[in-house]
C-alpha cells in the first residue's frame, strides 16, 4: 500500500502512517511531495536511477532491515554499527546523520535500517514538502523521544524551514511565532531528543550552517560488481527465482553500480524469462532480456550512448558545454548533470572539466571508434584491450 499524505509524499510500499503510535521500527509518514526536481523530469529508461512507482512497490519488500543484511558501503556500516551500539548503551538517540550520494544507492534504505537498529519509529518526509513553517512545526510536534526524522532531498528545504530546523536539531527546541509586525511574539518550546537523518544527491547545495549541524556526514559510493552480484542473488532469493551465477554476473555488471537498477533489472529479467516460459534464469535468457531493453555490457542505455555520440561526433570529443549537449540531445541540462553524468563520469566515459565535457578514450572504444591520440593520454579508465564496443560487437562471451 502506498500512502500519500498531504501534498503527496509517497511512503515506500508497506509503510504505515502512524502519527502518534510507538511501534518500534514502524514508519510514520507525515508529509507531502517527495517528488524531486529530477523525479519530476523522470528519465524514461529502465536505467534511470530515479525511483519509479514499480521500484517503490517492489523495493520495500527487498529492503534490508538490519545492518548485517545491508550489502556494501562497508566503511559506513562499520561507523554506524559503532555509533548505534554506543548510543543504545547510553540509551540516547544517535547523532544526526547526513547521507549523500547519487540516487538509487540506498540512502532511504539505510535510514530505515538505522531506525530499525535503534528500535525507533521513523517519520519520513522530503525537503520540498516542508514549504511553510507550520509544516515543520506539525512535523516535529509528532516526534517522540528517540524517533528518527528522515528528510529526503534535504537540499531543497527553503530558507525559512531550514532556519526553523536549526534550534530543533541543535537544542531540541522549536520557535513558535504568533502575531504580526510589532505584535509578533516568539515562544520557544522543548522537543524530545530525536535523530534527524537528511538525504541528498547534492551535498554541495546544502548550506554550511545546516551541514555543520550533522554529527555524521556519510557519502554513499557506487557499488562494485561483487556487491551488486550479492544484491542480485539476495533479491532473486526473496522473489523466489532461480538465477544461475553467470546470469547474476550479467545483471550485476549492467547495473551501473546502483542497487535500485540491479533490483529493477532482476524484475525485468524475471518477466522476460516468464514470458519466454523459462523456469530458470540462465546467462542466455538474462543477456537476451537485457539486450531487449537496450542495456549494454557496461550498463549504458540508448540515451547514454546518444550523449557520448554527440560529444564525439558533433563536438570532436569535447570539451563541450553542458547546455550545448542538452540542446543537441533534447534533454535539460539539470537532468543530464544529475541523472546521466554521474555514472558516465564514474565509469570513465566522460570527464567534467572547467571548459566543458570531454569524451574519454574509453567512450570512443565503447562506441567502436578510434580515440584521437590526445584522448588516449587522458583516459584513466580501462586499458584498450579491456574495451567492450557496443556497436562493433554487441555481446562478448
Ligand atoms: N537492496 C537495495 N540496496 C541494498 C543493499 N545495500 N543491501 C541489500 N539489499 C539491498
Image: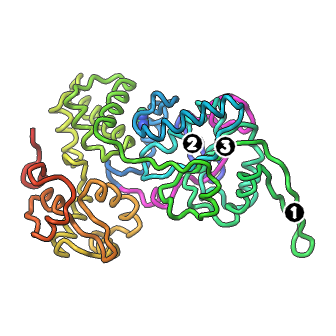
How far is mark 3 from mark 1, CA to CA? 25 Å
For disc 1, the marked residue is 186
Q: Which residue is mark 3?
A: 195
Q: Residues within 10 Å of mark 1 (few under 14, many from 20)?
A: few
Badge 1 or badge 2: first in the primary sequence? 2
Please say whether residue 33 is one of the residues in the magenta stretch: yes
Within-10-Å neighbours for mark 3: few <14, some 14–19, many 20+: many
For the N terminus, which image quadrant? top right
Q: Nearer the viewer, mark 3 or mark 1?
A: 3
Q: Is mark 1 within 8 Å of ligand 1?
A: no
Disc 2, SS: loop
From the image, tell me which residue sits under label 2: 11
Residue at image position (58%, 56%) is 154
Q: Secondary structure at mark 1?
A: strand
Foreground residue among 270 and 107 = 107
Q: Residue 380, percent across and down? A: 21, 58
Find residue 309 and report its image quarter. bottom left
Q: Nearer the viewer, mark 2 or mark 3?
A: 3
Residue extent of the magenta highlight: 14-43
Of residues 319 and 236, which is closer to you in this image? 319
Residue 36: in magenta span: yes
Residue depicted at 33% across the width and 31% down the height: 230
Q: Which residue is found at the position 10% from the left and 69% from the top? A: 372
Amino acid at each position: 500500500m502506498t500512502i500519500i499524505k498531504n501534498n503527496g509524499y509517497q511512503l515506500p510500499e508497506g509503510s504505515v502512517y502512524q502519527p502518534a503510535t510507538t511501534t518500534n521500527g514502524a514508519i510514520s509518514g507525515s508529509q507531502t511531495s517527495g517528488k524531486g526536481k529530477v523525479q519530476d523530469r523522470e528519465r524514461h529508461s529502465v536505467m534511470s536511477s530515479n525511483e519509479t512507482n514499480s521500484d517503490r512497490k517492489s523495493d520495500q519488500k527487498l529492503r534490508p532491515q538490519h545492518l548485517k543484511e545491508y550489502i556494501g558501503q562497508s566503511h559506513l556500516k562499520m561507523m554506524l554499527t559503532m555509533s548505534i551500539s554506543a548510543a543504545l548503551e547510553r540509551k540516547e538517540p544517535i547523532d544526526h546523520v547526513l547521507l549523500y550520494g547519487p540516487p538509487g544507492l540506498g540512502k532511504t534504505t539505510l535510514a530505515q535500517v538505522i531506525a530499525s537498529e535503534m528500535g525507533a519509529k521513523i517519520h519520513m518526509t522530503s525537503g520540498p514538502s516542508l514549504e511553510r513553517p507550520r509544516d515543520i512545526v506539525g512535523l516535529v510536534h509528532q516526534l517522540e523521544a528517540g524517533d528518527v526524522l528522515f528528510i529526503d532531498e534535504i537540499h531543497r528545504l527553503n530558507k525559512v524551514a531550514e532556519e526553523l530546523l536549526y534550534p530543533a536539531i541543535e537544542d531540541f527546541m522549536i520557535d513558535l511565532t504568533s502575531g504580526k509586525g510589532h505584535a509578533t511574539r516568539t515562544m520557544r518550546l522543548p522537543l524530545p531528543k530525536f535523530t534527524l537523518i537528511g538525504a541528498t544527491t547534492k551535498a554541495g547545495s546544502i548550506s554550511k550552517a545546516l551541514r555543520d549541524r550533522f554529527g555524521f556526514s556519510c557519502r554513499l559510493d557506487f557499488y562494485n560488481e561483487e556487491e551488486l552480484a550479492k544484491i542480485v542473488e539476495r533479491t532473486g532469493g526473496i522473489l523466489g527465482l532461480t538465477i544461475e551465477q553467470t546470469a547474476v554476473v550479467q545483471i550485476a555488471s549492467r547495473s551501473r553500480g546502483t542497487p535500485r537498477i540491479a533490483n529493477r533489472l532482476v524484475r525485468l529479467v524475471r518477466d522476460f524469462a516468464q514470458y519466454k516460459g523459462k523456469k530458470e534464469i540462465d546467462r542466455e535468457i538474462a543477456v537476451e532480456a537485457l539486450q531487449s531493453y537496450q542495456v549494454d555490457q557496461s550498463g549504458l542505455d540508448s540515451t547514454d550512448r546518444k550523449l557520448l555520440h554527440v560529444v564525439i561526433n558533433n563536438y570532436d570529443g569535447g570539451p563541450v558545454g553542458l547546455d550545448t549537449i542538452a540542446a543537441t540531445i533534447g534533454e535539460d541540462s539539470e537532468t543530464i548533470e544529475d541523472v546521466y553524468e554521474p555514472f558516465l563520469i564514474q565509469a570513465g566515459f566522460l570527464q567534467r572539466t572547467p571548459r566543458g565535457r570531454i569524451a574519454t578514450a574509453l567512450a570512443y572504444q565503447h562506441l567502436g571508434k578510434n580515440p584521437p591520440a590526445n584522448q588516449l593520454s587522458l583516459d584513466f579508465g580501462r586499458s584498450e584491450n579491456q574495451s567492450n564496443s557496443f556497436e562493433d560487437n554487441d555481446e562478448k562471451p
